[in-house]
Amino acid sequence: GAREKSSVHNVEGHTSDLGGKESGPNQVKLSKYPQHNFGAKNRSFNANWFESFTWLEYSKSKDAAFCFPCRIFGKHLKNDTFVNTGFQNWKKALDVYREHEKSPAHKASMESWCSYKASAAHGSVVEQLDSASEREIKERREYLRRVVAVTKVLGKQNIPFRGHDEGMSSDNQGNFLECMNLLKEFDPFLQAYSPPSHSTYLSPSSQNEVIQCCAQEIVKAISQEIKEAGMFSVMADEARDGTTEQLAVCVRYVAGGSVKEHLLAMTDLKGFDAESITTAIEDQLRLNGIDHVKVVAQAYDGASVMSGTVGGVQAKFRENHPMAIYVHCYAHQLNLVLCCTCQAIPEARNLFDLLQNVYTYFSGSLVNHDKFKETQKQLGLQPSELVQLSKTRWSCQLRSINAMIENFPAVLTCLSNISNPTAVGLHANLARFTTIYLLMVFKTFLSVTESLHKYLQSETVDLAKAEEFKCAVCATLKEMRTDPKATEVYDRAKALCETHQIPESCVPRQRQKQRRLEEYIVESSCGAASDLGNAEKLRTNVYLPCMDRMIAELEQRFSSLNSVVLKGVQACNPGSSTFLKEEDLRGLADHYNVDLKQEEVWVAKHYLDRKQESLPITDMQCLFGLLDNVMFPTLTQVIKICLTIPVSSCSCEMTFSVLRRLHTWLRSTMGQDRLHHLAIMSVERGELSKLSQSQLIDSFAKMKQRRYHLLLKK
């Protein structure tokens, strides 16, 4: 205690040549010690006493003996000779030493000294316990690193975790346990470490907790970036997954100078009305702590429950977020353009019905499919499959047409060798000049829109570029209305027909079916009309109507965006004729309550003119990176808003694609929470890879009270 230290200090102050607490007793061995007269003899200190009494020490300055443990560790012994003045009666030294050694006070001091030496060498009992505890925690964390690593890999790759029988005797314990067993074969740590039987962290509940930690840490990182960005946009879409209606909520924001789109949450809907969907979106924003951050836009598909201007989700969401403009997903709109064009033109509708029927014929029967593959080999064609048409699969029309053209020889040959009535009817419809011509027409049209389709599905797409590319597609289609383009398409169809000996012109009259065969030979299963005839007739009745319909759909469907906002976005586009037009920028800034400084725009124009000479500014993201936030605070704020406005809700659609890969029949009993967490891990695999094992273990440890400690002291 304080008294002990004070006492020792006073003693040591008068006898500076004595040993200290760490150095031990000062056992000075001299060739000759000072002698004093004791009766008839001169006597002195004897160095041999050090061997018999290890506690003994000698002060050369005082020519006296002291007891080291009593002096350093003794309590209430300051008046003791061996502590205070030192012992000098060398005549009776041995008797006094032995008597002192037997005293209770000395024994207590010796015990204290021994304890101190032990703790100095190995640490105190508490320190030893702490050290042992820390070592055990490190071992548990090292073990959990393997568990977390396996969980991350399986989650990222959409691989099921559990097996039907996970018992020790099972030869297939499921992917998770099998991966852990595989690691153990090559990992010395796992071979040596045996976790407690009740804390292996391999149970289904522990799996769920680790998966939940991964998803929560991903969303936490995304939410933090949104808070730092100060603004974001919401994208949402719903789809049925078995018997559950799932809602995917994605976000778009600018972080680190680049545009980011991420899945924020997945939730099952309790109702399908606008109120329920809006509440579900708002709940997710609130749960992740970003409900107070500025929402600049919202993007959904064109369903009335989402897009309704009075009772739709977009209207109800704006009640709490008045600045959030509604963007009808551009990718959905483009898909509707193609679908409506195909449905509005009878010849186009017949063509795609025929393509679907051919696909169904070959894919619906293993025998027919094998014949088709064998025909491909015989003709020396590259093995490939026909493509199914689907309303939910974008760009499938072009892929279906390309697949048919590539496999046309095999399809015709295979159908001609099958005597089945359906095959005969399909062959008759395919082997027509009109069918070939329609294939070439729609291959040409859809190839023009294909690049726009792909661009609109990118997360880095911005509204200004999307508008530019849409206008470019419209202009390209209008140029293709010319006679030379129509003739070029006709010539390609004619060349393919000549290769397969299909006559260019139609038969003068339609063949009359024999009554006895009319129930067996099917030539109009697709509702196909008779051939239209020569090039001019095809151009007038097919080519131009399809072209005009597609152009009209493009111009009509992409004109619903807020004109003030669109003008402002174009004014932030370096490639626009209205680039940095102050009037247009002002309208956008006013909508989002940004006090745009006129002087910033003026200075930015001159600054960018100089920059353009050495570094071409191609898009808004490049522009945003060039303008300093300190120099142009309000202008960069406006550009940031433009980059944050989404063009499509494709991120949500991609989430549902992942959901279909996750929720297979092998995982039919999976709970909704686990499904949602796994979906986040799979969709946001890039963010998952950024999470360290230590971070996830800390999150796992804090989730609830654990049987064993997992957190290291900081």
Image (tube, grey):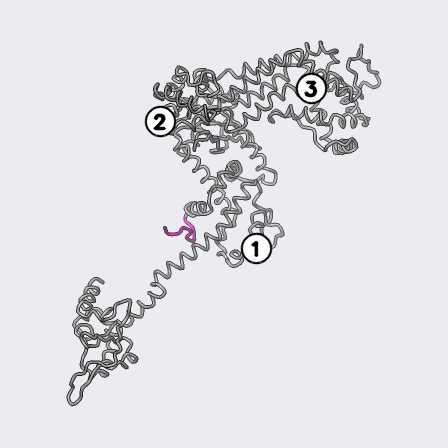
Disc 3 secondary structure class: helix
Q: Quadrant of the N terminus?
A: bottom left
Residue 39 image-quadrant placement:
bottom left
Q: Which residue is mark 2?
A: 631
Q: Is residue 235 visible?
A: yes
Q: CA distance from mark 1 to mark 3?
A: 58 Å
Label 3: few (<14), some or many (≥20) within 10 Å?
many
Mark in front: 1 vs 3: 3
Residue 346 image-quadrant placement:
top right
Label 1 close to label 2 by CB (< 8 Å): no
* The label number, if any, that marks residue 440 in the structure image: 3
Amino acid type of the residue tagged 3 in the rendering: Met
Does residue 418 show up magenta in the picture? no
Q: Residue furthest front?
A: 613
Is 26 on the left or on the right of 552, as rendered?
left
Q: Nearer the viewer, residue 20 or 367?
A: 20
Q: Position of residue 690 (x, y in %)?
A: 47, 41
- Which stretch appears magenta? 705-714
- Residue located at (66% from left, 19% from top): 442
Q: Which residue is mark 1?
A: 186
Q: Position of residue 293 (x, y in %)?
A: 38, 29
Q: Main secondary structure of the magenta part?
A: loop
Disc 2 secondary structure class: loop
